[in-house]
Amino acid sequence: MKAYERLLKYVAINTPCDETSNTTPSSKCQFDLANLLKDEMQSLGVSDIHLTEHCFLYGKLPATKGYENAPALGFIAHIDTVSDYCEHAIQPVITENYNGKDLPLGSSGLILSPDMFEHLKALTGHTLITTDGTTILGADDKAGIAEIMTLVEHLQSQQIPHGPICIAFTPDEEIGTGISLFDIDLLDADFAYTLDGSTEGNLQYENFNAASASFDIHGVSVHPGSAKDTMVNACLLAMEINNLLPSQETPRDTAGYEGFYHLVHMNGDCGHAVLNYIIRDHDNYAFQNRKNHLVSIAEQLNAKWGAGTVELCITDQYYNMKEIIEQNIHLIENAKKACEKVGLIPNVSPIRGGTDGCHLSFRGLPCPDIGTGAHAYHGPYEHISAQSMEKVVDMIIELVKIYSTFSK
């Protein structure tokens, strides 16, 4: 089975996470895909298969005879998708021999255009898999799952010599709540890669440092006709807080290594308001300065309006794994070689986000990220080509070959 055929099978199972849940997995539907994958792993000859109560699925391909001393290499992808644009079943649209021009997404009125996504021109002639404009596609990260499963099939059917191969599929990556329950000992890999990136050939190991920040603003609500020198409008204070942040340091205005503040949610009335932000920066020093700036804003407003008017809670979420991967830079150098062997141009670039791999790297399992070939995650413009997926499969096969003779 080809990788894109697996993708079509997997996206038929909706697996949105639920950020309001306090369980892992956050949504029971993630087990629907996990159970399908478990059965497929068994049919492909994967051994030591474990599906845990928290929806982590592990399996192994034992080393080919004579390759037992090669490093155990892990491949990881996540089962869940975002919850946005998941109100009904995903209906992928397949366009063969894509012409590189504007492509209507079903009858939604949305247009997938190279004016918006320049890389589409490079996909001319490809078999393009898109949404119908009403849902996500779910290639994030079911493309990664499909590529890993196709890797397993090729290793088995083509009898490609390899060292120990370790596989894991995880829940709730999109909300960052699942990975703390990942069993590194059960995976039993020396090194690993997540397949959760974008363009094929992308190799990423510099992710954001990340934190969430919540301002809880307590106003004083009285009748506006007698509010002189008494009313404290929490909504106006919320506006003041946001205006004290640099206006050009938002996701829309930043790229590459540039960090940002992002207002993700706000609500309130005169008496009470809440602002929820995320803070992102690759640089540790700049990351700390961003958090300090929020603290100074809270202090400034409390000095102006009274102690306790503004309560600020900052929670670190994850950190840049660069320092860990640089101690194991062979993971990037060997991935570059694998790309070049299959005709891909390796592109080492910063991750403007996080992956399960950044958490695992700090827990002792170095784990950079490989691009799956998918684009425009988390919305109705999400798409991928069948040829891109096959290139990724070819690339990770070469990576397995490289590590089969690599000394730990």
Image (tube, rainbow, N blue to C red):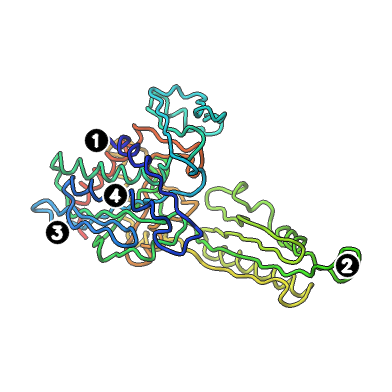
State the CA–CA distance, disc 4 to disc 1.
Answer: 27 Å
Residue occupied by mark 2:
227
* Amino acid on which disc 2 is placed: Ala
Residue at position x 18%, y 45% from top?
A: 44
Residue occupied by mark 4:
334
Residue occupied by mark 1:
1
Q: Nearer the viewer, residue 195 or 111?
A: 111
Mark 1 near mark 3, Cβ–Cβ under 8 Å? no
Checking the image for residue 69, the label placed there is 3
Asked where in the image residue 358 lies, by quadrant, the reply is: bottom left
* Amino acid on which disc 3 is placed: Asn
Q: Nearer the viewer, mark 4 or mark 2?
A: 2
Q: Earlier in the sequence, mark 4 or mark 1?
A: 1
Q: Earlier in the sequence, mark 4 or mark 2?
A: 2
Residue 334, image x and y in percent? 29, 49
Q: Residue furthest bottom?
A: 307
Residue 42, image x and y in percent? 19, 49
Q: Earlier in the sequence, mark 3 or mark 2?
A: 3
Residue at position x 27%, y 44% from top?
A: 396
Q: Earlier in the sequence, mark 1 or mark 3?
A: 1
The correct choice, above or below, for 61 with respect to 313 in the image is above
Badge 1: residue crowd in 10 Å (few <14, some 14–19, many ≥20): few
Residue at position x 57%, y 63% from top?
A: 286
Q: Nearer the viewer, mark 4 or mark 1?
A: 1
- As helix, strand or loop, the secondary structure at mark 1 comes to loop
Q: Earlier in the sequence, mark 2 or mark 1?
A: 1
Residue 399, image x and y in percent? 26, 47
Quadrant where the C terminus is found in the figure:
bottom left
Mark 2 near mark 1, Cβ–Cβ under 8 Å? no
Q: Nearer the viewer, mark 3 or mark 4?
A: 3
